[in-house]
Amino acid sequence: MPDHDAIAKRGRSLEDEYFRKKDLELIEKIRQAAAIDQARKDLGRKAGLDAPELLQELHDLGFTPDTVSLLPLVPIIQMAWAEGGITTAERELILRLARSRSVEVGSAADRQLTEWITNPPAEAVFSGARRLIRAMLDSGSAETSDLNANDLVKFCEEIASASGGILGIRRISAEERALLSSIAADLNARRS
């Protein structure tokens, strides 16, 4: 009989340990879900957006509350990459604009910007950014309160002409003009 009690105790002990581990796993999943939900709320508050599909898109593109301030710069970066590389003049203009928009040296946004200047973002970032910027402009987001679509197009034009042409002739290439038209159309489109 004593062996049977020991076996039963051992069985209960193993069962208790199993359920204790499952409880800890469940608690960790709940913590992770709460952290993701809080990050999404923070991102929405910072971006001035509350539509779940827009917040999911921001998240999917890799934006965080610390880097969402870069979103309005994405078309400008796209314009800089239009001809396959970013020149020193384009880089300086991008960094000057970023600093004027409170992107501090060494911050998460600055590190992301440096990465984008060194290696172009994925095409999905370029294509998704315009729609998200338009949504931010429409929402009156604090991140875009000092900008409008025309300002962003103007910055894109400055980037396009920063390193182009010989003696000021044909400063903006045909490829850059086509991209500029596309950016302007997307940024000036109103959501329905």
Image (spheres, rainbow, N blue to C red):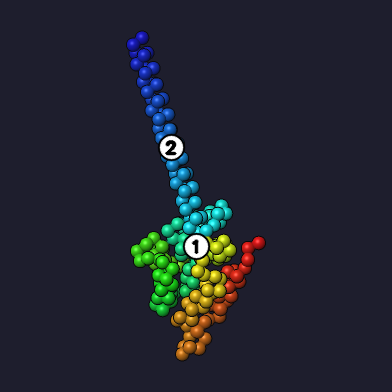
Residue 179: % across, % down: 55, 74
Q: How crowded is mark 1: few (under 14 residues within 10 Å), some or many (20 or more)?
A: some
Q: In this view, does 3 lie above or below 178?
A: above
Nearer the observer: mark 2 or 1; the answer is 1
Instruction: State the CA–CA distance, disc 2 to disc 1.
Output: 36 Å
Q: What element carries label 2?
A: helix
Q: Is residue 57 above or below residue 180?
A: above
The reply to whether residue 125 is visible in this rendering is no
Say which quadrant the C terminus sits in.
bottom right
| Marker disc for residue 181 | none
Q: Which residue is drawn at 45% across and 80% down?
A: 162
Dot 2 or dot 1, earlier in sequence? 2
Q: Which residue is drawn at 50% across and 84% down?
A: 171
Residue 152: % across, % down: 52, 72
Residue at the far bottom: name it.
167
Which residue is label 1 attached to?
142
The amino acid type, in three-letter code, at marker 1 is Ala
Number of numbered markers: 2
The reply to whether dot 2 and dot 1 touch (C-beta < 8 Å) is no
Q: What element carries label 1?
A: helix
Q: How crowded is mark 2: few (under 14 residues within 10 Å), some or many (20 or more)?
A: few
Which residue is label 2 attached to?
27
Residue 4: % across, % down: 37, 13
Q: Residue at x 41, y 73 (%)?
A: 96
